[in-house]
Every structure is written in structure tokens, then in C-alpha cells.
Image: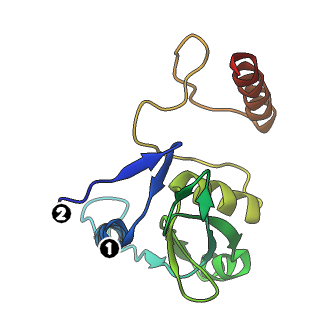
Amino acid sequence: RGVDMQYINGLRVTDEDSLTCVKEAAGAVRVEIEALFSMGLANSPMAGLRIRVASGNFVTAKPIGVREGVDYCHTGEVRRIDADGIRQQLDAGRLVLLSSMGYSPTGEIFNLSAEEVASAAAVALRADKLVLLVEGNGLRDGRRRLIQQLSLQEVEQLMRSRRKLSEDWA
């Protein structure tokens, strides 16, 4: 659509034009995912299986606001996850599809980090595991090898070591 996406301090600045693009993309992706889950693949274990998908306003968000003189407009962060609402859908046998958009109590729409939504949902649901597919090269260790899985203790240790590294460089 010719909209330049602007990133400052690792965060996308979501202006009005960018928000329109995000909403259109999220809607299109949701429809495609729902269509794929609707397929009845003959001669496969999926034949005749009806997979129901639920999506909705499970993510309450708040604006990032102005930081260091930068107005992030419609970029937000997770305020709350409706874990009870998600559990109700799961208990009814539905898959729950969460997007990277959240909604304020006043009806504003915010563009969120998909990783933050996934992490916040996993914490709110007290998930045993979080499986996250990301674009790019993934998380790397000190030798640039791909880290394929981490325990909570290993994540905390990695975060401490990276925090110390950034403090040493400051």
C-alpha cells in the first residue's frame, strides 16, 4: 500500500495509515487460518474432523504513548488477557486464535507485539509450554547457534547475562 513502516528503539510506530494496514492484514490472515482449519482432508486423519476456531477481544491493551519524545500513536502493550474467556472457548472444544491487536476499554485498537501477546497469554493461562514461531533468524546463543528450546530457568539466566552485557557496554 506504499506505507512506510517506521521503527524507533525496536518498536513500530503505528500511525493511522499503518493501523489500517495492520487491521487489513490481521483480518486476511485470520480468514485464511479459519479456512485452513475448515478443510476436511480426505484420506487423512483430518477427514471428517470439524475444528472450530474462536477469535475475539481477549486482549486488553494500553497505549505505549510518548517515550523519549516519540509518539508511538497506535502501538500498544498488553494490559490484560481474558484467560477465563479463552478457557471457556477451549473447554467448548475450540481453538483460540489471538492476533497482534488489542483493544482498550474505550474501544481503541492497538498494534501489539505478537511475541508479547503470546507470552502474556501463556502466563495468564498458566501454560506448561509456549511454542512461538517467529520471523527471522530466531534466538541465538553466544556462539550464534539457534536456541531451539529453553526452560524458564534458562530464560531467566539468558536475560540476566544479556542485561549484564548491555550494562557493561553502557
**Colouring scheme applied when the structure was drawn:** rainbow
Q: Furthest residue to the left?
A: 1
Residue depicted at x 61% and y 81%: 104
Contact, mark 2 vs mark 1 (Cβ under 8 Å): yes
Measured along the vertical axis of the image, is residue 131 above or below residue 65? above
Residue depicted at x 42% and y 63%: 14
Q: Specify few, some or many for label 2: CA neighbours under 10 Å numbering under 14, 14-19, or 20 or more.
A: few
Q: Secondary structure at mark 2?
A: loop
Q: Which label is found at residue 20?
A: 1
Q: Is the N terminus in the top left, top right, bottom left or bottom right quadrant?
A: bottom left
- Mark 2 and mark 1 lie on one chain; the one further toward the N terminus is 2
Q: Furthest residue to the bottom?
A: 106
Q: Is residue 25 left or right of residue 110?
A: left
Q: Specify few, some or many for label 1: CA neighbours under 10 Å numbering under 14, 14-19, or 20 or more.
A: few
Q: Which label is found at residue 118?
A: none
Measured along the vertical axis of the image, is residue 74 above or below residue 68? below
Q: Which label is found at residue 1?
A: 2
Q: Is residue 71 left or right of residue 90?
A: left
Q: Amino acid at mark 2?
A: Arg
Q: Secondary structure at mark 1?
A: helix
Q: Is the C terminus in the top left, top right, bottom left or bottom right quadrant?
A: top right
Q: Amino acid at mark 1?
A: Thr
Measured along the vertical axis of the image, is residue 146 above or below residue 53? above
Residue 30 position, x and y percent, is: 36, 71
Q: Is residue 122 left or right of residue 48?
A: right
Residue depicted at x 57% and y 26%: 147
Residue 2 position, x and y percent, is: 18, 59
Q: Furthest residue to the top?
A: 143
Measured along the vertical axis of the image, is residue 82 above or below residue 64? below
Where is residue 164, by image quadrant?
A: top right
Residue in front for this viewpoint, 36 or 43: 36
Instruction: Give how far apart the Cα atoms at labels 2 and 1 are.
Output: 10 Å
